[in-house]
Image (cartoon, coloured by chain):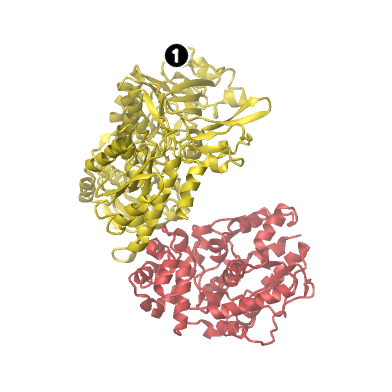
């Protein structure tokens, strides 16, 4: 076919009246038929319909066409359709060129004369390019049947369980000493008031016992290379200074620790204290202790009494100060990113006095306070007393451009309603006030729950709080009641800030590590906001949970299942088609400068030393997405894009001008 | 700019109607008929005509508390400025305090009258006609006439003492600043009272004077003057090849370089002081730490913070010499009580105007706290 004469068929679609009402389709058809090598030029009402496609197939067979131009909608819409069509007729699917005369012509112009002229040019350009197109062969790579899940919160737990249940091996990497994530810190969950621990613990235990899941806790992914089907990873296992196989979780080490009760508990977000050897919470998985190296006297000062008290106390000889970090190398086919979120730091809004006044709490601090596993065993005690006036402030760090967070955190309205309910339940006489801008009770059962707490007497005042000042031993919460237009100041002995969800502090590093993008809000960017919500721009890497954006537990679990299912789809088939319109390097022209390596978002090019002192860029076809960035950056013109070669594009431009 | 354009320019259409502005506004707290939120709402609903005729347009202190906290980044300060520019085109203006004398002085400076604005330069001060650094004195010489010794509204502050302080401090740093009798009012008040043309003319005259002296650097003590020269001159007259610094920025640097030194002796009973962040130094210029760094370097004093400090600081209650009222008095009294509640003996200010307004509010009251300028303390203790 390659040596045969070029025989082009051109098909102009009316798209009902979408194109035909603005573009004179007959005129386009007739002018195009005059062009060299155009054997057939036709128009049809709906080219994408079965009769439309049949028309193309029949012409290819009857008239020996070997190049096809479709003048219709955006290639994003129907290029795959028509590639399949011409393949059915025996042509290479890459012998097709689309001319977009809908989005880029009829929809954006009103003048029929002008639009018709433009359509003729666009189709001529496609005809010019199609003559130069080369058939390309599609390739497949194997997909390893193992998955990596990064992050052991509810998103990572759910994704791991689903993938493991389908029979694939899962490596679950968790940075902290236990899985569980933020959900483990919550007391009850809205709107059903399920105890968070009660619904989470069974899943955590299932992870631990699942034969297909290998849990790498207290570990971090440090290197990712490769591509869909064959990712190669390095994972750093931090030393726990306690042998996992010996520790029984008895806690004698923590009891004996000289620093007992003096270290701030991260799990209790500063509300409680712990020892240096710790287990973050009673139902931790794995239920093994970890020695916190930053606060350990023996590790930091080299001395802890005569000998470390924890070591002396351990009856199973598990304490091991000789432990070193370990690098584990893994190969996986797919990756699920479930790295979660950080809580907005309310100190960024100094007018609320968070960090200054002990009775101004973040939403998560309140969760620990009200939780029966928390430092007060769930008793709501502030300054030794039960609070009588509690004020909740919504949108702290959300919907607030003054701190750079324009988005809604989606959970605060409901967690505030739930927290108000929990106080009402425990302290029925407490006066509860919520300051809000808008209430967003969008989920199943949410509006009903909001209704319920108002019925319980929680007062909702529309207006955001401007500041909190100290008045004697009480706080004065100042706002405007915007519905009556008057200032309203409320005395409070407890203020709970509905602190929002922000991207992880190290989100940029993780994005760079995985070569995935972030949206303007800082969270990881999904493939498409509607149609590809769990994909990333990198094949084989999927998103789950708040790493992609704020969401509640039901949405997180749903998304985790979606991400797991996407990963499983690839692994179940065991093979995946890779992009064929990739970049290729002319090794002779390449000067080995490495600019392609710098600009590539996906990590496809690599400099190889082909002879001593001679570096040449080599592009991994399986990683390359064909974006063309390297080709533009290449100063010597060594890189060209298959299907978008310079001469192909220049011929297109020449046809237009 | 018509009201629709102002809404666009100041991003007012992003308003979430949350009320943080009105709740933050010191005026709205004492004058329930004034609401920044409702002014914006009116503009959004197309009632710009009402706003420019509204007496309350002149009640805003342009203190910036609302702007700094607005979750939608609505530029309320410029909203007010632009609305006032429109209002003054229609002949509207605020109610001038001091019978409008301050405004008259400003307007007189637009003419070719020969000034006598350097009378305060004492014999021990070294100043120059030409040189690298220009000390922009601002209104202090004129404040002396009204608020100084023998002025009809003497508040016991001797305003030009701040100018002498500044030159003394600069001399100590080895700087012999240019001080010019041709300097004019910086135009801050005219601009914020809607007289854009008057502001422009003053700015042009000042830039001419500064450049004629050969100076490349302008030092301001007055924070309003600083913000005006630093931000508004380039905004309205284009980029100028001038470095504008505020005295406390300069001194904080000198302190780090070891060039600003104080007497060794710290007494056993340190004097407690508290510091009032002026709106233009704080929220406008974001200079919060420099004055504090200097104060903490002075032996024998202990700085105690007021409940509302830095970006949350309360305004001194009046601005632009308009609409000084019972509301202003309430705001000032609240601020003074807040200062007294710290247990401090001295309330330090960094803005001559704040000093005047807060001192005025003390008149005939039982508030005892002494009011001083930071430069008073520096001159007293520097070696």
Q: From this viewpoint, is residue B270 visible?
A: no
Q: From this viewpoint, is residue B251 visible?
A: yes
In the displayed structure image, the side of residue B285 where residue A182 appears, left or right: left
At 70% across and 70% down in the image, what residue appears?
A: B135
Front-most of residues A622 and A570: A622
Please state the horizontal and vertical placement of residue A610, each as a whole percent of the image: 62, 25
Front-most of residues B155 and B240: B240
Q: Residues within 10 Å of mark 1 (few under 14, many from 20)?
A: few
Front-most of residues A181 and A250: A181
Q: Secondary structure at mark 1?
A: loop
Quadrant for residue A164, please give it: top left
Q: Which chain is red?
A: B
Q: Which chain is yellow?
A: A
Q: Quarter of the image containing the N terminus of chain A?
A: top left
The chain ID associated with circle 1 is A
Front-most of residues A321 and A311: A321
């Amino acid at each position: 076919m390659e040596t045969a004469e070029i025989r082009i068929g051109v098909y102009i679609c009316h798209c009902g009246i979408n194109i035909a009402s603005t573009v004179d389709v007959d005129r386009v058809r007739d002018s195009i038929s005059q062009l060299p090598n155009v054997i057939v030029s036709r128009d049809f009402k709906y080219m994408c319909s079965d009769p439309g496609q049949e028309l193309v197939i029949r012409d290819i067979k009857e008239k020996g066409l070997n190049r096809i131009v479709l003048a219709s909608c955006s290639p994003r819409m129907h290029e795959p359709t028509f590639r399949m069509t011409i393949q059915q007729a025996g042509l290479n699917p890459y012998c097709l060129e689309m001319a977009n005369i809908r989005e880029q012509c009829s929809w954006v112009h009103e003048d029929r004369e002008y639009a018709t002229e433009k359509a003729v040019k666009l189709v001529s350009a496609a005809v010019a390019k199609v003559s130069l197109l080369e058939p390309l062969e599609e390739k497949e790579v194997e997909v390893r049947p193992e998955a990596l899940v990064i992050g052991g919160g509810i998103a990572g737990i759910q994704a791991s369980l689903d993938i493991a249940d389908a029979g694939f091996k899962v490596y679950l990497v968790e940075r902290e000493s236990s899985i569980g994530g933020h959900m483990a810190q919550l007391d009850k969950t809205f709107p059903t008031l399920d105890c968070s621990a009660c619904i989470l613990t069974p899943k955590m235990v299932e992870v631990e016992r699942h034969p297909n899941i290998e849990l790498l806790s207290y570990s971090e992914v440090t290197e990712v290379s490769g591509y869909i089907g064959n990712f190669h990873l390095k994972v750093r296992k931090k030393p726990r200074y306690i042998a996992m196989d010996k520790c029984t979780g008895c806690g004698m080490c923590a009891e004996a620790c000289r620093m007992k009760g003096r270290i701030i508990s991260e799990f209790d977000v500063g509300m409680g204290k712990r020892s240096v050897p710790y287990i973050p919470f009673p139902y931790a998985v794995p239920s093994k202790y970890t020695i916190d190296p930053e606060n350990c006297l023996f590790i930091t000062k080299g001395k802890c009494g005569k000998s470390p008290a924890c070591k002396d106390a351990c009856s199973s000889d598990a304490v091991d100060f000789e432990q070193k970090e370990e690098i584990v190398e893994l190969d996986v086919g797919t990756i699920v990113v479930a790295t979660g979120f950080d809580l907005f730091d309310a100190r960024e809004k100094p007018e609320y006095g968070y960090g200054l006044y002990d009775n101004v709490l973040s939403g998560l601090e309140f969760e620990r306070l009200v939780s029966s596993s928390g430092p007060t065993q769930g008793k709501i005690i502030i300054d030794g007393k039960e609070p009588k006036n509690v004020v909740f402030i919504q949108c702290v760090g959300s919907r607030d451009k003054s701190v750079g967070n324009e988005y809604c955190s989606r959970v605060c309205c409901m967690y505030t309603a739930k927290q108000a309910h929990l106080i009402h339940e425990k302290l029925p006489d407490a006066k509860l006030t919520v300051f809000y801008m808008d209430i967003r009770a969008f989920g199943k059962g949410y509006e009903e729950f909001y209704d319920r707490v108002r019925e319980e007497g929680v007062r909702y005042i529309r207006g955001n709080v401007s500041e909190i000042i100290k008045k004697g031993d009480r706080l004065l919460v100042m706002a405007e009641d915007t519905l009556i237009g008057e200032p309203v100041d409320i005395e409070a002995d407890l203020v709970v800030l509905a602190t929002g969800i922000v991207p992880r502090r190290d989100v940029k590093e993780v994005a760079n590590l995985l070569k995935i993008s972030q949206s303007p809000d800082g969270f990881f960017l999904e493939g498409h906001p509607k149609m590809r919500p769990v994909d990333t721009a990198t094949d084989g890497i999927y998103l789950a949970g708040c790493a992609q954006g704020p969401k509640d537990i039901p949405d997180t679990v749903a998304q985790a299942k979606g991400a797991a299912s996407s990963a499983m789809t690839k692994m179940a088939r065991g093979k995946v088609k890779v992009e064929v319109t990739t970049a290729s390097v002319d090794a002779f022209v390449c000067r080995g400068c490495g600019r392609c390596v710098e600009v590539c978002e996906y990590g496809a090019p690599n400099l190889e030393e082909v002879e001593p002192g001679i570096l040449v860029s080599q592009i991994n076809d399986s990683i390359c997405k064909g974006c063309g960035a390297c080709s533009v950056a290449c100063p010597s013109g060594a890189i060209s894009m298959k299907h978008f070669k310079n001469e192909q594009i220049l011929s297109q431009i020449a046809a237009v001008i | 700019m018509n009201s629709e354009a102002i809404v666009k320019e100041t991003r007012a259409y992003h308003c979430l109607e949350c009320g943080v502005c009105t709740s933050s506004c010191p005026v709205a707290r004492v004058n329930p008929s004034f609401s920044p939120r409702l002014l914006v709402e009116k503009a959004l609903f197309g009632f710009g005509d009402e706003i420019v005729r509204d007496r309350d347009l002149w009640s805003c202190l342009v203190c910036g508390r609302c702007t700094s906290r607005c979750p939608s980044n609505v530029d309320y300060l410029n909203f007010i400025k632009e609305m006032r520019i429109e209002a003054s085109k229609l002949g509207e203006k605020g109610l001038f305090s001091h019978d409008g004398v301050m405004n008259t002085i400003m307007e007189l400076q637009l003419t070719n009258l020969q000034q006598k604005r350097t009378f305060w330069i004492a014999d021990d001060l070294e100043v120059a006609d030409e040189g690298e650094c220009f000390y922009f004195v601002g209104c202090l010489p004129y404040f002396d006439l009204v608020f100084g010794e023998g002025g009809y509204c003497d508040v016991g502050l001797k305003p030009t003492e701040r100018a002498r302080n500044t030159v003394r401090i600069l001399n100590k740093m080895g700087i012999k600043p240019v001080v010019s009798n041709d300097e004019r009012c910086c135009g801050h008040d005219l601009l914020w009272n809607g007289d854009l043309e008057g502001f422009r003319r003053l700015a042009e005259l000042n830039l001419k004077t500064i450049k004629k002296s050969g100076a490349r650097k302008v030092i301001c003590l007055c924070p309003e003057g600083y913000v005006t020269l630093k931000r508004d001159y380039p905004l309205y007259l284009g980029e100028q090849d001038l470095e504008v610094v505020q005295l406390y920025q300069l001194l904080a640097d000198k302190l780090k370089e070891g060039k600003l030194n104080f007497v060794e002796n710290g007494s056993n009973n340190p004097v407690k002081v508290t510091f009032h962040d002026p709106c233009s130094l704080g929220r406008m210029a974001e200079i919060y730490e420099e004055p504090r760094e200097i104060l903490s370097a002075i032996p024998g004093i202990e700085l105690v913070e007021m409940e509302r400090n830095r970006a949350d600081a309360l305004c001194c209650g009046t601005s632009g010499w308009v609409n000084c009222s019972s509301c202003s008095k309430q705001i000032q009294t609240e601020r003074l009580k807040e200062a007294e509640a710290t247990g401090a003996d001295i309330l330090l200010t960094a803005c001559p105007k704040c000093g005047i307004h807060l001192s005025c509010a003390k008149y005939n009251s039982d508030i005892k706290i002494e009011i001083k300028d930071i430069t008073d303390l520096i001159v007293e203790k520097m070696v």
